[in-house]
Image (cartoon, coloured by chain):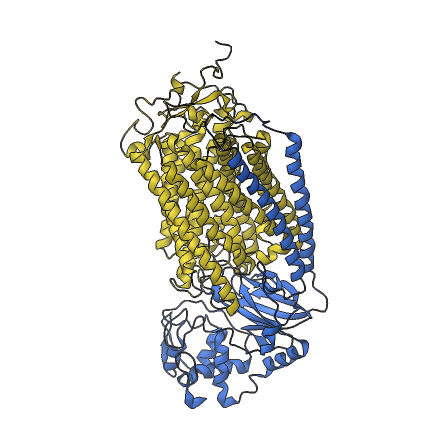
Chain colours: A blue, B yellow
Amino acid sequence: MLMNLFCSSPLLAAAAPRRGFWMPEQASTVSGEIDSIFMLITWISVFFFVLIVVLMGYFMVKYRRVEGHKSAASPSHNTPLELTWTIIPVIIVIVIFYMGMTGYINLRSVPVDAYEIDVTAQKWGWTFQHPSGAIETETLTIPKGRPVRLMMTSQDVLHSLFIPAFRVKQDVVPGRYTYLWFEASATGRYDLFCTEYCGTGHATMGAVVEVYEEDEFEEKLEELLRWIEDIPEERLFVAGKRLYNRCVQCHSLDGAPGIGPSFRETHELWGQERRLADGRTVTVDENYVKESIIYPAQDITEGYGNLMPSFRGQLRERELRALVQFIRHLDRFDDEGNLLEEWQ
Amino acid sequence: MSTLSTHPSGTNYLNHTRGIMSWIFTLDHKRIGMMYLCSVLLSFFVGGMLAVLIRLQLWSPEASLFTQDQYNQIFTLHGAIMVFLVIIPSIPAALGNFVLPIMLGAKDVAFPRLNLFSYHLWVVGALVFLLALVTGGLDTGWTFYTPYSTDTDSAMGGVIPALTAAFILGFSSIFTGMNFIVTIHRLRPPGMTWFRMPLFLWAIYATAIIQVLATPVLGITLMLLAVERAFGIGIFDPSLGGDPVLYQHFFWFYSHPAVYIMILPAMGIISELISIHSHKHIFGYKFIAFSSIAIAIFGFLVWGHHMFTSGQSSLMNVIFSFITFSVSIPSAIKVFNWLATMYKGSISLNTPMLYALSFIFIFSIGGLTGLHLGTLATDIHLHDTYFVVAHFHYVMMGSALLAMIGGMHHWWPKMTGKMYSEFWGRIGCGLVFLGFNLTFFPQFMLGSQGMPRRYAQYDDYLPETVQLFEFYHQLSTIGSLVMAAGFFLTAGYLLHSIFFGVRAPANPWGGRSLEWQCASPPPHDNFAETPTVGDCYDFSVLEWDEKEQGYTWREDVPRPGEEGTG
């Protein structure tokens, strides 16, 4: 579902670097260095592991108990030997620590000219806002070869933003800003995960990072700002379908109740009264839907909990209108969300 | 000498008194230890079945068996049961309770009533934990991270009962630790100086210190959390003016040392098993003993390495990373010392020894992959992925729990008075070993390739990613079934041995610590008179006795305390 969104040029896939056995694609400027530290530690580990297991296996066979054989006398301690196998590991781990520290300092030192994107996390999705005001949720569109800094905060519980191909991860904490930065070194499409457990939809709280060459990136950015403006007013409900991807985790289109009421049910109640959890009723209309997006705690539908985060500031006026039109005209879509033929 | 009688004549601790009440309200450390063992194994069964459900769910990328909410509850219960009800009490409270006083030549622990109270607290804790399931379920993960856990709209309703349960279980753990510290200080027999104690006792001692010093912090933290959730007092929730990262500091200040509550006693068991089954003096006794204490001390100073991506300052990350590496050294020392113990030994490949060798294999992998995680630059990538899951299962399950199973086989003849089938024992150990590695090794690749923890499904990502994850998950699921088969086989032949097993001799393996000098099973008060001990790793004084089918003291060697008196 995520992958089909924002169909990207076939060239992108061809240019993508390959996965290794241990590590995913190297798609950022730091990934090469981090992978070489990882592999160094891995080879040191393999060396010690093989040493231990080979010795163990050899002793198991050579000194296995046979009839009449007694354990031979050998010293029960040997201080120089024991100091050796204390001091050599000490030296090795100090070297590993130092390499890990310098690599980490790189990860935390943001270049001054970084392109800055605001990230808001909430159950269970991401909002990425570009300096131009362009907002995206299912994808994170970034340029290749320019440092990018993500300034992140959460609306509700802890989340964590993880892009394996870039080797970066940072928890997203409510009530404070955290940051991370990277510079993509290869165009392509990469997974973005939430790696801090955040409840029901944790496993599907992902997005796709799309890396473009600089000029193509500017075009994409332009399109992100413009796409909804290009859709004529009377077709705005089609734009709402695209925005619905933010809602799909909790609101179905086929009438099945989810974490929130199905949009099909809301649509069918259009113009009529809906019973609320506190016993009041409310008329389902444009205002009600818009208010519910911006102030979700205000009118909780009977039978549901106060679980929806506010989308205030994350949707522009025209986008809000598109969503309202989408629900109002849901009869033009089938249960899977496909536009019926007569409306295409 | 009656204390050393190898022919169990008359009563032992199992038939000393009869009736269910004589067990529930017993003050005998052996009976309490056995009740702990049964309770822990029952919990292990429940937690293990939940683990199999997790593996079955992840066989296919979509949420096939359970909904996301159900899966979240299953992994939470698996983690909480395995940590609080199984691994933490497994070695100290179950095996430790049985063995420790006998190893000391004592009649019981220093405070038998407190010991019984610890067990009763464990039972109450487990029952309160069940209450969490009927009051709305628990889906916070065993870590109870805030603000998720304090937000009543997010976490399910069972948080407060679960916190209460962990709080009660914490006290059970504290009391056991206190009891053992006092017992080791006060009840050592004549001749047993600190450096003549069996290394298992050093390990239990180091563990007890951690239990007493760290567990109260967990209790306070969980109480703060409950207060925030119940009364909305802002401590951790930023919307009430609190700080969620503070919770992580408090939580890991206990839960990192808790990792050593799990692994230190396991290392103690391995020191015993390797030395006894190699029939050779332990190598580097003092280095092993001091490394236990070093691990206990360093273990308190590294909690921040669970929080490298949490948003704590970069300087703190660097400091915590540095101290973290210091813990790897004493662990490495122990492994090398165990190998040196085997050198020129006379190694019996009995089931307990096979578990000990499996431990060395598995713990080496678990320990060495800790280097990847202690290193800052690589941990950022690996944090909260399956690499971490694989790492801590290698240490906690493959090392701590298998050592416990190995120790159980080692002391089984002593505890039950019966021998189990060596043939099935070896096969069971082999299945568990193979199944374990097949389950968890693929998870290293899964994690380094980016698969995050605690995912109920993984179908929502790029097709190539999903395909790769599916491959490794399926390997892992197959492994878990092999391992489950191994454990069921083990349960089968152990139960069989209770009813049909051959009567166990006092000393089937050739151990020299005091528990091998009293009958199997031991009489109610262990020793009629306090024995005197010598070097418990000097096995030259023992010889195989064909008639006895066990080891006995050589006729030509005087017993300690008898030298000079003629």
Above/below status of A183 relative to B199: below
Give percent across and percent down for residue B67.
Answer: 39, 64
Q: How many marks?
A: 0
Pick the residue in front: B250 or A273. B250
Residue depicted at x 57% and y 30%: B283
- Image point 40% across, 19% down: which residue? B3
Residue B108 appears left or right of A310:
left
Where's residue B265, x and y in %? Answer: 49, 37
Q: Dividing the picture into quarters, in which one does residue A161 lie?
A: bottom right
Residue B139 lies, with reference to residue A322, above or below; the image says above
Return the residue nearer the eye: B171 or B272: B272
On the rendered structure, is B490 left or right of B451? Answer: left
Which image quadrant: the N terminus of chain B?
top left
Q: Quadrant of residue B126?
A: top left
In the rendered view, would you say A247 is above or below B371?
Answer: below
List the single residue furthest toward the left: B19
Viewer-side residue, A27 vs B142: A27
Q: Is residue B204 visible?
A: no
Q: Position of residue A246 (x, y in %)?
A: 49, 73
Say whether residue A24 is visible: yes
Q: Is residue A181 above or below residue B368?
A: below
Q: Position of residue A89 (x, y in %)?
A: 65, 42
Q: Quadrant of residue B329?
A: top right
- On screen, residue A83 versus residue A271, left or right, reads right
The residue sitting at 36% across, 51% down in the picture is: B131
Residue lying farthest to the right in this orientation: A112
Residue at the extreme top: B566
